[in-house]
Amino acid sequence: MHALSKRWLATGGAVVLAALVGVALLLRDGGAACAAARAGDKATFYELGGGTGNCSFPSAPADDLFVALGAADYDGGAACGSYLDVKGPKGKVRVKVIDSCPPCAAGHIDLSRTAFKRIADEVDGIVPITYTTVRAPKVPGPVSVRLKEGSSRFWFAALIDNHGDRLRSVKVNGKTATRTDFNYWIIDGGAGAGPFKITFTDAYGRSTTVPGIKLKPGVTQKAASAILEKKKPKPAVSSAAPATKAPPPSPAPAPSAPPAPSTSASETAPPAVALVARPAAC
């Protein structure tokens, strides 16, 4: 968690002035999560200090390219471990979501100083940007699992990293885990003594299984092998012709209806109007 004053004061006097001028506008900004580029979004920068961010990753990315999101975009921890492509006045940068920014409105992102300098001059303090969520980004290593200190056969909590895309669900030995806003997946009743087979499904419906995770709290375990579950193929359609059935008996002819009375031209029904199919709206 970060206080507003710490984030802005860390950037220096000129940056503080620029940020304060824009605070009123930033707090009015609204919008949905960053699934697509949005004009009018803004970026500031901050120092992580001695912490590691609300996503609980053991350390910041080695390249120091990371970002904190406001509550709407952080989405209760669902954004943790995903990546954004950010474009600013001077260029673009790819950053990993590792933290939340409580004072940031939707569309306001708080970059690491290193990332901010890739897209703007540091003295600007606050700049207009656009950004998008990256699908299937390249990650720095294999999937890893870290069991939280205090985990036991009666209480399970796991942090999953290097998955790239947002995670939608996690199961451990068949038991469903619950996500916390600090990015651990918890099973209050525990999942046994292990080893554990962890299956996680991302926001796009792709599932990956990591077997052989041991009950070793506080230790990051890198997956020796991760199994990406592919969609099951559709059953083949038989090319054989269906068996021929005897046609049903012809029904008896219906009695003839009496001739309809004649009508004048003014009483004749209007001709049918052809309906033209229209494409669905996007």
Image (spheres, rainbow, N blue to C red):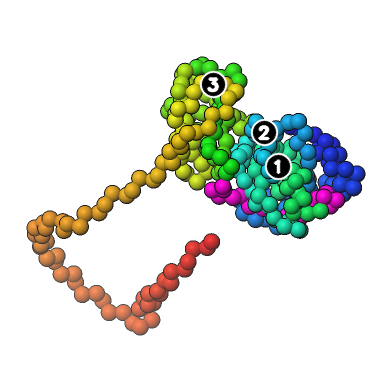
What is the CA distance from the residue labelled 2 to the residue labelled 1? Answer: 10 Å
Amino acid type, callout 2: Ser
Query: Which residue is labeled 3 in the image?
Result: 216
Q: Which residue is mark 1?
A: 64
Stretch in magenta: 122-138
Callouts 1 and 3 close, C-beta under 8 Å:
no
Vertical placement of 194 versus 50: above or below?
A: above
Q: Give residue 59's mark.
A: 2
Q: Quadrant of residue 262?
A: bottom left
Going from the N terminus, do you reach mark 2 or mark 1 first?
Answer: 2
Seen from the viewer's position, the closer of residues 209 and 76 is: 209
Q: Quadrant of the N terminus?
A: top right
Choose between 33 and 154: the one closer to the eye.
154
Task: Give the residue type at disc 1.
Answer: Asp
Q: Is residue 91 visible?
A: yes
Q: Residue visible at 40% across and 74% down?
A: 274
Q: Residue at x 15, y 69 (%)?
A: 256
Q: CA distance from mark 2 to mark 3?
A: 19 Å
